[in-house]
Amino acid sequence: MMKRLSSIYLWLVYAFLYVPIGIVMVYSFNSARFATNWRGFTWGWYAKLFANRQLMDAALNTLTVATLAATLAAALGTLAALVLHRYRFRGRKVLHGSIFVLTVSPDIVMGIAMLMFFIALRIDLGFLTLLIAHITLCLPFVAVTVLARLAEFDENIVEAAKDLGATESRAFRHIILPLIMPAVAAGWLLSFTLSMDDVLISFFVSGPSFEILPLKIYSMVRLGVKPDINALSAVMFTLTVVLVLTAHALTKARRK
């Protein structure tokens, strides 16, 4: 009886989370001009979506920032994880704790903090400030992911390589990096997804001269939900699902 109740509860949670998304995706094929009236199936809203120059420019800006932020965060986060795992130094525990604190910090707090930081340095809001903010957002998640992999790492392999004449850099390139690469790739994909979907931090640091897709969608929704917005949401959700499944597959391979 308890097992059946648990299953029912689980399916209710899934329904609460995914039924609204399913409705959005279904109505993205609705031929009616208003999302609440079903008038028939059409691909027209997707054609209109990809013909919208402003949306495509915003999408290109979003992909550019997400790719650069994920790549730089993956590199810096991996280095941070290696330093925390392999070396002992003053302030190590503080640094280790601060990384975990950043993963649970509210986005609005980080957004305001980054905005005040850029204003204090008199940096104009735009592409650069958005990129720095997204790197700051994503870096802790990469570090935590790589640290989890390093916790399972056998240091005897590196010591054996050094006994055979390998330098520190060669041991890193040929032993450590290949073994942690699935975790680095998973961290990159997670960072890319976080950057693509971020609204709050981007709202504070993007500025009026650089428009990205999440903020563009937000401004469009304020005037009413239209089928082309449903189509755009469906495309972004599908991309996010693909990235998350890829990250999960890489993480699973890492564990094996």
Image (cartoon, helix red, strand yellow):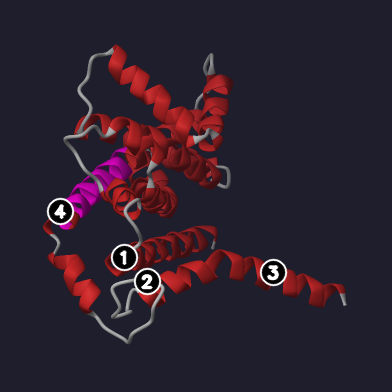
Question: Which of the marked residues, 1 or 2, is nearer the chain's N terminus?
Answer: 2
Give the amino acid type for the residue marked by disc 1 in the picture. Answer: Lys
Q: Residues within 10 Å of mark 1 (few under 14, many from 20)?
A: some
* Residue 161 at x, y percent in the picture: 42, 42
**Label located before the other in sequence (3 or 2):** 3
Q: From which residue to which does the magenta span run?
A: 56-72
> At which x and y percent is residue 145?
49, 45
Q: Nearer the viewer, mark 3 or mark 1?
A: 1
Q: Main secondary structure of the magenta part?
A: helix
Looking at the rendered structure, the kind of residue marked 3 is: Leu
Q: Quadrant of residue 4?
A: bottom right
Q: Nearer the viewer, mark 3 or mark 4?
A: 4
Q: CA distance from mark 1 to mark 2?
A: 6 Å
Q: Residues within 10 Å of mark 3 (few under 14, many from 20)?
A: few
**Callout 2 amino acid:** Ala
Q: Quadrant of the C terminus?
A: bottom right
For discs 4 and 2, the disc positioned in front in the rendered view: 2
Rounded to the nearest angstrom, the CA distance separating label 3 from label 2 is 29 Å
The local crowd at label 2, few if under 14, some if 14 to 19, many if 20 or more residues have their Cα within 10 Å, is many
